[in-house]
């Protein structure tokens, strides 16, 4: 636990100094401005999408930016020759990325309270945001491993974002019949949006359960079977 | 002295598509010595070092550390290992102090790293972002980082690379002090002056193969030519010749020169490690 805390503290300092936290907050400010400018009903309608974009898709970009800075400097290699396991190092990086999503959620929650005088349930939102962020971070690592550099990642990311949004578009346009909507849950972005929507328009228990299983499934499979085994090799190739 | 590392039949390749970069390497590294790993660029020195510090686990052959297979050792192995990579690895937007504080927090054993920063001439710069450091300053910080946990085994890759003579002197003195404390130090370098000054034993590697292991002194004896270069003036004309050192006093030509000419200079032709390096690594892999 001590090692994790040391690494986590270091990660927070690093994300701050490399202005990754700053850019994350800057994006949050954009969401806050939107929330301030629209009515309470419009804000409530937009929030699942906003939270999804912030905790899912933005988290991937910020993770990648932090990763490539570190890869450029070769510092992960230096941590790997310390008495720290790659799993703890990876956990500290995930926790660092999670903190950005949590900060953004809290800011949005406070803005809704102050500007519109309404509150959405913060603790369930926090739980869902954590699941959404971790699911997207697992995909983020896959993208990082498959990319040569940050530019290459951005190109692949654009394609993946399109792919993740296709199920949302198909469901919204009623192209996918409701009995087949579970297929769309293979997109963690759709699953995340579904789960976040539950905070405003509750889903049936069964639908919520399936949605959460999909969200939990991605990191549960990807982190131990793909991301962690390749983590050391990717880190030392820097 | 006991063996710290025993390397038997070590082979390594980065992927199955690639050729082996280390081929059937057999080597013993004793505790308490400064061991130099030498060879031309791309010889496999850094790869060997990465295997020994467990950064490259997928090797073939047997490597033991203090008698235990290296592969069976867990992360606590690193509590007593210090590594100074060839390219300094630091968080450039953090200060030197923040960098060291971060890495020091990962070890059980702690030292007062600020004293070391002062010793290597970075005392006043410790609160500056490392990105503002010169290459030499980064190298010195790299060296201090390797000592953070007061390690029993120190791996240094080109430790004086990019340093001016006075800073290189400080680092070399500190390396010798670490040796006096009983630590084992593995150095990878191209600088034969450093090797001669620091190393108790050296191994020459080329194309992933071990070519020679010996002390610098015995290498000089083995490869050195016991010769003497004489410059003399003969009828106002400068001439020079090289004669064997052994039996010089009875050498007829030398006797003649002594009697009939004026000797201007006379130097023994001791073979430098640079020449030995070229001879050993060039002879078989040139």
Image: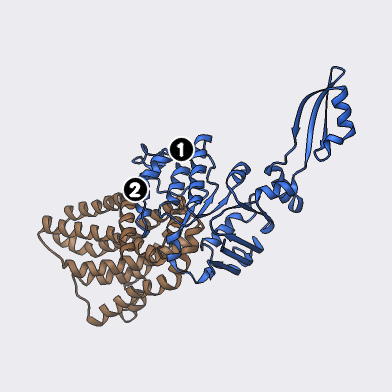
Chain colours: A brown, B blue
Question: Does residue B77 sit above or below B264 in this rendering?
Answer: below
Q: Position of residue B227 (x, y in %)?
A: 79, 38
**Position in image of residue B2 (x %, y %):** 56, 63
**Disc number placed over residue B234 in the picture, else none:** none
The N terminus of chain B - image quarter? bottom right
**Separation of residues labelled 1 and 2 (CA atoms):** 18 Å
- Residue sitting at x 53%, y 49%: B86
Closer-to-camera residue (B47/B118): B118
Q: Is residue B88 left or right of residue A182?
A: right
- The quadrant holding residue B116 is top left
Question: Up-down: is A194 above or below A109?
Answer: below
Q: Is residue A4 left or right of residue B277?
A: left
Residue at image mark 1: B134
Q: Which residue is mark 2?
A: B98
Answer whether labels 1 and 2 touch (C-beta < 8 Å): no
In front: B252, or B143?
A: B252
Q: Residue at x 25, y 78 (%)?
A: A208
């Amino acid at each position: 636990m001590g090692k994790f805390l040391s690494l986590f503290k270091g990660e927070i300092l690093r994300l701050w100094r490399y202005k990754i936290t700053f850019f994350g907050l800057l994006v949050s400010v954009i969401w806050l401005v939107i929330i301030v400018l629209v009515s309470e009903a419009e804000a409530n309608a937009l929030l699942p999408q906003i939270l999804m974009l912030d905790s899912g898709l933005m988290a991937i970009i910020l993770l990648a930016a932090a990763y490539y800075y570190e890869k450029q400097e070769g510092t992960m290699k230096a941590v790997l020759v310390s008495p720290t396991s790659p799993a703890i190092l990876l956990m500290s990086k995930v926790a660092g990325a999670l903190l950005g999503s949590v900060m953004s959620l809290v800011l949005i929650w406070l803005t809704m309270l102050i500007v519109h005088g309404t509150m959405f349930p913060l603790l369930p939102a926090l739980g869902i945001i954590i699941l959404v962020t971790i699911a997207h971070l697992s995909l983020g690592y896959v993208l990082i491993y498959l990319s040569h550099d940050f530019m290459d990642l951005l190109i692949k990311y654009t394609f993946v974002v399109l792919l993740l949004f296709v199920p949302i578009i198909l469901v919204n346009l009623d192209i996918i019949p409701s009995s087949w909507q579970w297929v769309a849950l293979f997109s963690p972005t759709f699953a995340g949006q579904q789960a976040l929507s539950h905070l405003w328009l509750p889903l049936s228990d069964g639908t919520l359960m399936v949605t959460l299983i999909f969200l939990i499934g991605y990191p549960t499979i990807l982190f131990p079977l793909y991301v962690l085994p390749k983590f050391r090799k990717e880190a030392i190739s820097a | 002295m006991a063996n710290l590392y025993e390397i038997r039949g070590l082979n390594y390749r980065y992927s199955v598509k690639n050729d082996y970069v280390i081929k059937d390497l057999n080597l013993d590294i004793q505790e308490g010595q400064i061991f130099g790993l030498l060879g031309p660029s791309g010889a496999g020195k850094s790869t060997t070092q990465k295997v020994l510090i467990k950064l490259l686990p997928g090797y073939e052959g047997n490597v033991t550390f203090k008698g235990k297979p290296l592969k069976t050792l867990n992360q606590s192995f690193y509590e007593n290992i210090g590594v100074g990579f060839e390219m300094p690895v630091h968080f450039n937007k953090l200060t030197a102090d923040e960098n060291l504080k971060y890495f020091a927090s990962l070890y059980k054993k702690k030292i007062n790293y600020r004293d070391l920063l002062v010793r290597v001439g970075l005392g006043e710069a410790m609160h500056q972002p490392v990105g503002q450091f010169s290459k030499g300053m980064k190298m010195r910080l790299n060296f201090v980082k390797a000592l953070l946990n007061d390690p029993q085994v120190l791996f240094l890759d080109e430790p004086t690379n990019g340093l001016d003579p006075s800073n290189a002197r400080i680092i070399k003195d500190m390396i010798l002090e670490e040796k006096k404390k009983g630590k084992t130090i593995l150095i990878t370098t191209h600088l034969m002056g450093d090797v001669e000054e620091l190393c108790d034993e050296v191994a020459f590697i080329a194309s992933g193969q071990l070519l020679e292991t010996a002390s610098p002194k015995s290498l000089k004896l083995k490869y050195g030519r016991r010769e003497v270069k004489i410059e003399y003036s003969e009828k106002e004309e400068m001439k020079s010749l090289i004669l064997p050192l052994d039996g010089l006093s009875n050498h007829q030509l030398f006797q003649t020169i002594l009697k009939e000419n004026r000797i201007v200079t006379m130097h023994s032709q001791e073979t430098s490690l640079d020449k030995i390096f070229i001879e050993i690594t060039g002879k078989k892999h040139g």
